[in-house]
Image: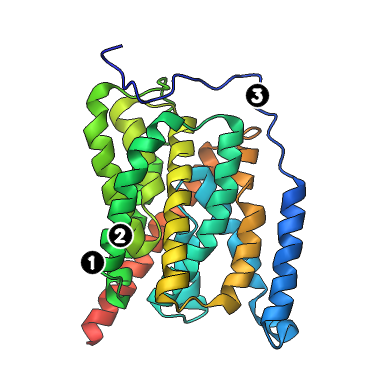
Amino acid sequence: MPNQLPLLSSTTTNPADVGTFRYFTPWLFILSLIGCVIYWRAFPDPLTLATHNWPLILVGVLGAFIGNITAIGGGIVFIPVLMFAYKIDPVSALKLAFVTQAVGMTSGASGWLRRGEVPLGLLKWTVPPLILGTLVSTFLIHPQPMLVKGLFGPVAFITGLLTLITLDRKGGLTELPAKAFLPTLLVAFIGGMITGWVAIGEGEIIAAFCMLSYGLNANRAIGLGVVLLAINSLLLAAIHAFYFGGVPWDMAAFTMLGVLWGGRLGPFLAQWISLRMTKKVFALIALLDGLVVTCHAGYSLFLK
């Protein structure tokens, strides 16, 4: 077919399969148990630490739910909470967001894949530019505190706007036209760079682009965005955990437990509820985050 990308799978979601995705699986309990055992042995005073950081479990659940139902990414919650409520420096908050999203977005991505609403054929063309963009933003222009604060606000605001703009876009296509090939690669590259600096961007940008520019089905666009952000987060988590270091594991232990359970809520609840109001609320959260962080960054510059 000359007007469609041959690289995209033509497989559509089987209506009979929608609604069969189950939230509870044995591996959720197994991984939670493993995480608790590791936590108990890794920290010298786990009970005292838990009394201070247990709210981060709830933050993880909320961040993962937002990240997997809109493809924005849990960083939209993690970074502001850590910066303002826990007084963590922006780069450490960014590192925690990476390792937490690696768990939460992977958990959610497995749900979208299970539902069959991810255009798998497009992944092999979008993953390489995503990885390239991630490496550029991580190694060539390494994230610094002012870069994280200065860029997070505008990106959060833009992702909130994109969520509102795509609110009523359902889309009817399961494949993209051939003319979408190069633009999609470019968007994936830019999204990879942005995510390397602020932990969000790849998922919502690629999903909104596919919906607004070419009319890709909304669920398939979000499924694609979630999977790409999961891959992006896994790569960034590995780089910062094993190469750069500096991950605040005493907090990440709690957010990671939260996102493990919150990640599957997005694809699970998408089967049963109308997502319009939910997305509107989350978009407003993103807009508020963007304004608050931008004002804080501007105030910090003013003081200097």
Q: Quick one: label 3, few (<14), some, or many (20+) residues within 10 Å?
A: few
Query: What kind of residue is marked 2?
Result: Leu
Q: Is residue 128 toward the left or the right of residue 119 in the image? A: left
Residue under numbered circle 1: 140
SS under mark 2: helix
Give the total of numbered labels: 3
In this rendering, the label closer to the viewer, 2 or 3? 2
Q: Do we see residue 105 in this rendering?
A: yes
Residue under numbered circle 3: 17
Question: Nearest the camera: 179 or 87?
Answer: 179
Query: How many angstroms separate mark 1 from mark 3 (CA)?
Result: 44 Å
- Residue 49 figure quarter: bottom right
Q: Earlier in the sequence, mark 1 or mark 2?
A: 2
Question: Nearest the camera: 179 or 290?
Answer: 179
Q: Earlier in the sequence, mark 1 or mark 3?
A: 3
Q: Is residue 15 toward the left or the right of residue 8 in the image? A: right
Q: Do we see residue 154 in this rendering?
A: no
